[in-house]
Amino acid sequence: MRLATADLTHSRLPEAAKTAGHSTDRRHRVHSIRDYVTEVEARFPTLDELSRVFGRSARTLNNEFAAEFGETIFDYMTNHRLMMAHEAILTSDVALKKVADTLGYTHVNNFSAAFRRKFGCSPGSLRRRRTACAGPDLVLGD
């Protein structure tokens, strides 16, 4: 995991995000959104920020994204980042506070609660066991 800040200036956007707002192809747009939110680290971009970047209303973006991927943009970002955290905790000794900061959580307790909801165990217990949690939402490789 690398630490970066979310910078929504046009010059720092992935190429897909620069062109997606001009595209009439809904599928291309939602895949570009997925690629963009996967690349942005630290603070989650808001729907309003994504709306400005991709040139569509927040509601339209969220509805199109959910129709294509079966979850809202926020749920996708949360699930993706928690999967990244799970992998980082299993494969590295990065401090849990650093993992939480990298994911955009201002408090490690909020990160721990979200992690426990998704995986059924705390980040600390996963670190101690070094084996995957048996939570119902664990699907490695996504």
Image (cartoon, rainbow, N blue to C red):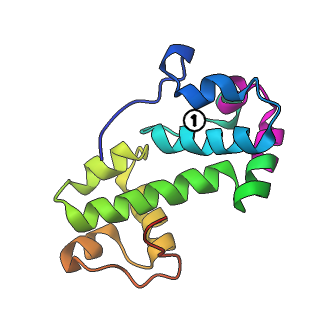
How many marks the image carries: the answer is: 1
Q: SS for tag 1?
A: loop
Horizontal side of 76 relative to 63 (left or right) equals left
**Quadrant in the rendering for residue 110:** bottom left
Q: What residue type is labelled 1?
A: Pro
Nearer-the-camera pick, 27 or 48: 27
Residue in the picture at 35% in, 54% down: 108
In the displayed structure image, the side of residue 27 where residue 44 appears, left or right: left
The span picked out in magenta is 50-63
Dividing the picture into quadrants, the one containing residue 19 is top right
Q: In the orientation shown, which residue stands out farthest toward the left? A: 93
In the rendered view, does 61 fall on the left or right side of 104? Answer: right
Q: In this view, does 67 lie above or below 42?
A: below
Q: Is residue 5 above or below residue 132?
A: above
Please give left or right for residue 95 compared with residue 31 in the image. left
Question: 129 or 114: nearer the eye?
Answer: 129
What residue does disc 1 label? 45
Residue 86 place in picture, x, y as percent? 35, 65
Extreme residue in the top direction? 11
Please report the residue visible at 57 percent of the width from the left and 35 percent of the height from the top: 45
In the rendered image, residue 139, in percent from the top left (x then y), is placed at 48, 74
Query: Which residue is pictured at 53% across the width and 60% down the height?
Result: 79
Residue 2 on the magenta segment:
no
Please state the horizontal and vertical placement of residue 81, each as a whole percent of the image: 45, 54
The kind of secondary structure the magenta stretch mainly shows is helix
Mark 1: give few (<14), some (14-19) or many (20+) Cα within 10 Å.
many
Q: Where is residue 17 in the image (x, y as percent from the top left)?
A: 61, 29
